[in-house]
Amino acid sequence: MSQVKTSSNPPIKRKKRGGDKKAALLLLPSFLIVSVFVYVFITYTIGVSLAENWMPAKPSMARGEDPFATYKNLFLNPRFQSDLRNSFIFTFLFLLVTVIAGFFIALAVHNMGRSKGFFRGVFLLPYALSFIVTGVVWRWLFNPDSGVNLFLQYSGVATLYKSIKGEELRPEWLTSATTVGDVSALLEKIIPGGTFIQVQMGIPLALIPVVIATAWQLLGFAMAMFLAGLVSIPDELREASMMDGAKGSRYYRSIALPMLAPIAITTLVILTHVALKIFDLIYAMSGSGIGFATDMPGIFVYESMYKALKYNTGAAASIVMLAIVCVIVVPYLIRTNKETKGH
Amino acid sequence: MSTETLDKVNTRAHKSAHSRFGSRSRRVQFIFLCLLVPLFTMPFYVMIMAAFKTPQFAEVTTMWLPPSPFSLDGLQEAWSKLSPNFLNSFIMVVPAVIISSAIGSFNGYLLSKFTFRFSNIMFTMMLVGMFIPYQSVLIPLVKFLQLVNLYGTTPGLVLVHVVYGIPITTLIFRNFYVSIPKEIVEAAAIDGAGILRTFFSVIVPVSIPGFVVAGIFQFTNIWNDFLFGVITISDPTKQPVTVALNNLSGTQTVNWNVLMAGALIAAIPTAMAYLGLGRYFIQGLTAGSVK
Amino acid sequence: MFKAKGKVGVAVFTAVALSLSVSIAPANASGKIEVFSWWTSGSEDAALQAIISAAVKANSGLEVVNAAVAGGAGTNAKQVLATRLAGGDVPEIWQTHPGGELGQYVDQGVLADMTAVYKSEGWDKVVPKDLVASMTYNKKTYSVLTGVHRANTMWISSAAQKKAGVSLSGSLTWPTFKAAALKMKAKGIDPICLGDKDIWTAAQLLEALIVAEEGAAGWTALLNGSKKWTSAGVKKAVANFNEAMTWVNKDHKALDWTGAVAALAKGTCGVNIMGDWAYGELLVKQNKVDGKDFTYATFGDANTFVTVGDSFVIGKTAKNQAGAVAFAKAIMDPKVQLAFNKLKGSAPVRSDVSTKTLGKYQQGAAKVLANGKKVPSLVHGQALVAAAVGQAYADAVTLLQANKDVAKFSKAMDAAIAAN
């Protein structure tokens, strides 16, 4: 991937193999303890999800006649169907906005002189806030009557809109019950056992303010990641490309971008993990929304386990989310890990 | 690194940036950034205004208006309820960030510079597991902590954060190190350095930006964590500040001025960590590394 | 012989003295107890502190650790409690709702039986029988109530009423309310204030409408499964609800319940169906005067009280049982009942507590609590059904708001009650 060709010494076989085995051993402790905290606990959770009536002080893993009934009911539950839809759309939109904006902001900040520190601070500061408070503030900001809609009025955009379209410009934001684009019919043809979909499989407009709020909070982190990548590009590469007379954009396209690819992947993985587990921010901002427009699996697990006291349902939902991640993310991870390690 | 070297490197970066790009595109970027600034600070404006209002006035319909009357009550109440827990957070966060970053960087080095049979599988397995919502593994987690006698203790909470932080710090460093040419490592190996020595003498010096982002991520993550803090420690005097912050909002009644003031106060240490770490975003640390 | 007699004499004397001291000396509990609740700030915290200071004063040497966790209307606290119960780290006292939630703790066998204390302290005589019944399983009573809130109160803005030229009071029929609502709408006032970012407020509104249509007996039947949710009463109530949703403020999904109360206080909307924790909000935060700035009424029978009780239970395996009982006694102390409910805005559970010093609304509520028909609130987890039914109800209301489909709603509720 790197444009710089350096002389490669043929690896000294014996030393390398010895070093590699040692490396595996040195990685083992981390791997083991993470595995306990992750896979052993997940196994316990799977047990809870199959149990008939597990309770904290009476942790009985005894199964009912149909241990998979919990999972079946989950997929038939309109709330969980909404959660899957919302999670997918939210993650996609959020990644799109945050990674791309973060990248361009990082590029711009990287080129600044003395104002670099100031800009870095402004964009990174939202990340320091607790998610709960972010949710509340943005709920206020997106209030259709007293929030950012006021700017539309004061700036004249609203009057302009009214003169063109003839109707009021008052985005409903979180209070919107509209879902755009319903592909339920298509999905029912694809997924076996078809007509169980009970919700509109489109984009709930109420998710847009949620994406904006989360992007606001996490953009600074994406920017920081790309900045770290940009400052690590060895000076020689930059100067060499200058001497070759390459313009700025050519430098970016052929040198900087490829070098930033691993960092981009890291950012994508971390932000995906944030998006899939999002809870506090949305809970504080919009709750489950109209007709579950902004409900997320994290909220569903929380309420199932600790409000409805149905531990098996909550556990099952978590396992389903994990399974979906495995199916989608794992092949991607394995492939990109191989690629980025290429050289 | 001494401050003189920092300054020298900074000026060099500054000059490089200047010389490569025409000042026109820099100006455009500058304007672009300036336009974004009000967008990003708007929520802070609302928060700060609310923090200084009286409870009755601090609500959604009056969010844009400055406080009238101006009141320090929110700040005072928030401070009195949060300050006892600040120390707890520090004692917990600092070791957790340092340890998880250190382990992550070492693991990242192992995964990026060595090829062993299960490296890809081990790495992927470590990453995937953290996608599960933590609410569902709380109970086995508590049982485990009780097993090792760390339940209810700060070291127990540090352990939890370190373990759940390892996958991400490993990811950050591993993908950061892949762009460091393998030849440097092998050169050191030829010189007779073992794995550990190569790590400390070759890898760590060029890892600074990696430590910066890992530090930013972990500090934020761990400082703002509520779930593990409230579950693993039941003694209210030992809980981190996020639990106290959460408790500023009552079940039925919420005094927004207190909550906003509290949120701002609680964010200060993290903001300062960013300031401190941000100074290390310096160009040219890998200068001379490519022969 | 003298020595032997003396020895016996001393022994007898000591025995008598000891037995006297056991029966005469006040039960003074000491040591540390942990009180676990979700009351962390404002009036709730103040009210809790009233109990704590009373308990500490009555028991020298008693140390109370206040381990409260806010959030999610108690769900955060329940999350912590679940992990603690699973780990065997049981607090002495914790907060719960009488009804199905309490029942699930009883099922797990983690609660201490308080029947004996009820008898010895005479609480079974001063607490209304149906309230005690909601905390009793298999003839054993397991918790004490701090106070009872009412969920089906309609708060009315006097300014809005005046502007629209209506006057609502007492028991309201739907036609009466509808007429008033339309008058308010004509004057540009949103008839109903609603802040349902958290769905429970809308669910509470529907619950009040169902109770109004079905009555106390009907509601009980719906909850225990003997009446189906496809009944005419429910159908009418849902139709009313759908109509009511056309009368709410447009930004209702972006407001929480306090935002709706604030709007009511300002007079931009007419009425707000809310539990009487709104009373404290109106008085203290909004600085409004009972009777002058706001009044109250009820959908349907004004003598039907939808209860939202807060109760505390004792962990059977907790270390300091004596301390826990002492705390429970402090909760039920008449002076503490008065002080607590003054701060919290709910009604005292003891019928022998004079309500003269409480606000006008509270006096009325206490009377209805003592003499009226009491039914548990499903929204607030008071009903004798599994907690999952309450969650199913909230979910069904969320969907109902979006699709207005009464058939789906009824089907979901019947399924939930059957499954649990």
Image: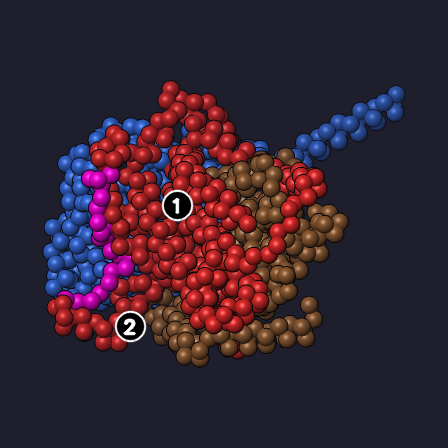
Chain colours: A red, B brown, C blue
Q: Identify the residue under disc 1.
A: A299
Which residue does the image show at 32% across and 34% down from the upper left?
A75
Residue A236, numbered circle:
none
Q: Identify the residue under disc 2.
A: A151
How many marks can you see?
Answer: 2
Residue C404 placement, left or right of B165: left
Q: Earlier in the sequence, mark 1 or mark 2?
A: 2
Q: Which secondary structure, mark 2?
A: helix
Give percent across and percent down for residue A340.
51, 49
Which residue does the image show at 55% across and 49% down from the upper left?
A343
Which residue does the image show at 26% across and 71% down from the upper left?
A152
Q: Which secondary structure, mark 1?
A: helix
Q: Chain of mark 1?
A: A
Marks 1/2 in contact by CB < 8 Å: the verdict is: no
Q: Is residue A219 visible?
A: yes
Give percent across and percent down for residue B290.
62, 61
Q: C362 or A199: which is nearer to us?
A: A199
Q: A274 or C190: which is nearer to us?
A: A274
Q: Is residue B248 visible?
A: no
Asked if both marks, 1 and 2, belong to the same chain, the answer given is: yes
- Magenta highlight range: A167-187
Residue C108 placement, left or right of C251: right
Could you tell me how far apart the alpha carbons at marks 1 and 2 are, in whole angstroms?
A: 32 Å
